[in-house]
Amino acid sequence: MQKIMIIEDDPKIAEHLQSYLLKYGYDVKVVEDFLRVLNAFTEYQPDLVLLDINLPSYDGYYWCRQIRKESICPVIFLSARIGEMDQVMALENGGDDYITKPFHAEVVVAKVRSQLRRAYGEYAVQREERVLTKEGLTLYLERLELTVADKTASLSKKEADIIESLLERYPRIAGREDLLEKLWDDQAYVDENTLNVNIARVRKKFQELGLPDAVETVRGAGYRLNVSSLKGEEQ
């Protein structure tokens, strides 16, 4: 059963959408705590998200960007805003479609089914799972998992992107600028410390796998895999 998450602060609209989607056989979760949207997303792992723009504390654009750090599942924006720029912003922030309010529930269901077909069904691109394997490490990009020997660590989307770059460039150095370009579309809006924080998280994942020295800092250049560390684990 495919899972739909509704992030909508109008309880009547959320309830209406939920009841309609349930009739079509979907499992549906309505978010109620708008400060823990990402937590709810991570716990529920939906196949698609219906996301309002005007939300308490943080708007839908913000939450879509956070979701995109963890998942590539379809996100459909719901909004009373009808301006072209609002729709452009929705797409630029990671959305896949945009529905203006008021709307007919049948239209929402049709768009939900369309996005699910494109992402997972008959219209989805059929290809083998992307897997990178080097020096005893195996990175499963669609699963967001990293394994070595019989150990497995779960990754965020950005952690997987960084490890993918390190594996692809091995034994060369993955430059800081290259990593920033891969992780963020516009480097000008990224604080220099942001990459450091993400590298620290990647190192923590390697530590969970028993490889505390797997990522080497090359001063003034970037980062590369520490081969001796990896081979030491294999022996």
Image: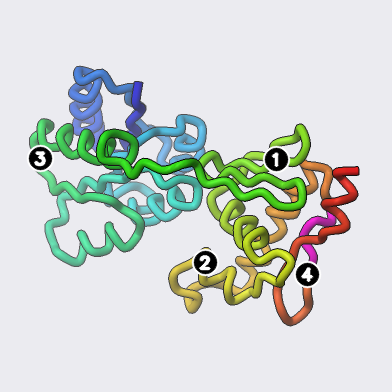
Magenta residues (range):
212-216
Instruction: Please state the horizontal and vertical placement of residue 97, each as a whole percent of the image.
Output: 23, 50
Which of the marked residues, 4 or 1, is nearer the chain's N terminus? 1
Which of the marked residues, 4 or 3, is nearer the chain's N terminus? 3
Residue at the image position 23 percent from the left and 64 percent from the top: 88
Q: Magenta span has 63?
A: no
Q: What element carries label 2?
A: helix
Tell me, for residue 103, which label it has, or none: 3
Q: In which quadrant of the rendered view does residue 221 lie?
A: bottom right
Q: Main secondary structure of the magenta part?
A: loop
Pointer 2: what residue?
182
Instruction: Please state the horizontal and vertical placement of residue 17, each as a whole percent of the image.
Output: 21, 29
Residue at the image position 65 percent from the left and 74 percent from the top: 175
Cα separation, mark 4 vs mark 2, equals: 18 Å
Which of the marked residues, 4 or 2, is nearer the chain's N terminus? 2
Crowding around mark 3 (Cα neighbors within 10 Å: few <14, some 14 to 19, many 20+) is few
Q: Nearer the viewer, mark 4 or mark 1?
A: 1
Q: Which of marks 4 and 3 is in front?
A: 4
Crowding around mark 1 (Cα neighbors within 10 Å: few <14, some 14 to 19, many 20+) is some
Q: Which of marks 1 and 3 is in front?
A: 1
Cα separation, mark 1 vs mark 2, equals: 22 Å
Left or right: residue 133 compared with residue 21: right
Q: Callout 4, which amino acid?
A: Thr
Instruction: Please state the horizontal and vertical placement of residue 174, each as a whole percent of the image.
Output: 66, 70
Cα separation, mark 4 vs mark 3, equals: 52 Å
Pointer 1: what residue?
147
Looking at the image, can residue 9 be seen? no
Cα separation, mark 4 vs mark 1, equals: 22 Å
Q: Callout 1, which amino acid?
A: Thr
Q: Which of marks 2 and 3 is in front?
A: 2
